[in-house]
Image: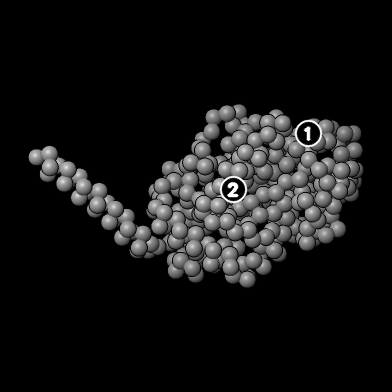
């Protein structure tokens, strides 16, 4: 009897493994959902749209962008942990919900290095600080002086509590000794609209979000957070040149899947991503939006995120920024 039970168990295990292999070989057999944890029009949405056509061609299936905004991307990331690991749900990851938010919370909703299947990094960029075109400050120094004498009118916008735009503002408060009031929005797009209207006075976000409005004369750039000046804003000084090296920061984006995705599927998605990023028009689209393609495969990307957690932890502790 024991022998029959053991044989039955072994047969069930082998059958399950065989079924997983068959499923992996047949994948993809239906459309793939690409989740964006922010509203349309923001930097992560732009990354998703840059990738969508190439992924569709590489995979031979429609790639449908699904917006799930909330809590600076944390809502979508938390839901992904509970999603089936079948290769049909991917998410555009970024530094906010996968590094900064977990470090700012005492009770973490997930462990980034453990609770996801990392597919690959896609891109990276620094940030640009912008004020309304009608603002009296034309430089970072002038903005700091203005904020000190107009404390009752000084605020900065962000794309959500715990986002990189939130931390960028807090870093300026710390570095310049300011008390800018944080005004969080449900993504960058509505924040930009209120910035243009003068309801808030500053936003430090990716160039892909702010460049069109800066080029149209609706916003004015004060500094970039890259170590060197950027091609998108060659006349705009770096934070270091403006006298505040502590404001240097860079962001990144990539693809992530639910935990437990079979290795075979992980590598298939990674191969499709690699083929997409190799397309000249995709690289050009990233460059046009002030970003650049940065390729890291699954294992390298996972190690990079682990290193990012270690790198940002001291800065976040020093800033005093918390989400609890």
Q: Which residue in the structure is indicated by mark 2?
A: 304
Residue 46 occupies which quadrant of the picture? bottom right
Which of the image's four quarters has the C terminus? Answer: top right
| Quadrant for the N terminus in the image | top left
Q: Nearer the viewer, mark 2 or mark 1?
A: 2
Closer to the N terminus: mark 2 or mark 1? 1
Mark 1 neighbour density, 10 Å: few (under 14) some (14–19) many (20 or more):
some
User: Is the residue marked by circle 2 packed among few (<14), some (14-19), or many (20+) residues within 10 Å?
Assistant: some
Residue at 81% of width from left, 43% of height from top?
245
Element on which disc 2 rests: helix
The residue sitting at the left extreme is 1
Using residue 287 as the reference point, say whether residue 306 is left or right of it: left
- Residue 299: image x %, image y %? 51, 51
In percent of the image, x 73 and y 42: which residue is there? Answer: 168
Between the C-alphas of marks 2 and 1, the distance is 27 Å
Could you say which is closer to the camera, residue 210 or residue 258? 258
């Amino acid at each position: 009897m024991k022998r029959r039970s053991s044989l039955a168990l072994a047969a069930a295990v082998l059958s399950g493994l065989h079924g997983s292999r068959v499923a992996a070989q047949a994948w993809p057999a239906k459309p793939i959902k690409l989740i964006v944890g922010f509203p349309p029009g923001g930097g992560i949405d732009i990354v998703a749209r840059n990738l969508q056509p190439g992924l569709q061609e590489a995979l031979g299936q429609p790639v449908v962008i699904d917006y799930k905004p909330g809590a600076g991307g944390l809502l979508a990331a938390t839901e992904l942990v509970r999603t089936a690991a079948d290769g049909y749900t991917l998410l555009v990851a970024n530094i906010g919900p996968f590094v900064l938010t977990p470090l700012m919370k005492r009770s973490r909703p997930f462990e980034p290095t453990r609770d996801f299947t990392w597919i690959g990094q896609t891109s990276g960029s620094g940030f640009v600080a912008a004020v309304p075109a009608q603002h009296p400050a034309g430089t970072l120094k002038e903005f700091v002086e203005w904020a000190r004498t107009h404390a009752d009118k000084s605020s900065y916008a962000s794309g959500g509590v715990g986002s990189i735009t939130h931390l960028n503002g807090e870093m300026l408060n710390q570095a310049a000794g300011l008390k800018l009031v944080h005004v969080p929005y449900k993504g960058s797009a509505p924040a930009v609209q209120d910035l243009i209207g003068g309801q808030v006075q500053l936003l430090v976000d990716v160039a892909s979000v702010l460049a069109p409005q800066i080029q149209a004369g609706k916003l004015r750039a004060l500094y970039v957070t890259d170590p060197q000046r950027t091609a998108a804003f060659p006349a705009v000084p770096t934070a270091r040149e403006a006298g505040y090296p502590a404001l240097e920061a860079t962001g990144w984006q990539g693809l992530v899947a639910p935990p437990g995705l079979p290795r075979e599927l992980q590598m298939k998605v990674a191969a499709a991503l690699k083929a997409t990023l190799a397309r000249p028009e995709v690289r050009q689209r990233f460059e046009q939006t002030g970003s650049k393609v940065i390729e890291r495969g699954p294992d390298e990307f996972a190690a990079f995120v682990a290193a990012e957690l270690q790198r940002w932890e001291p800065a976040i502790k020093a800033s005093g920024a918390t989400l609890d």
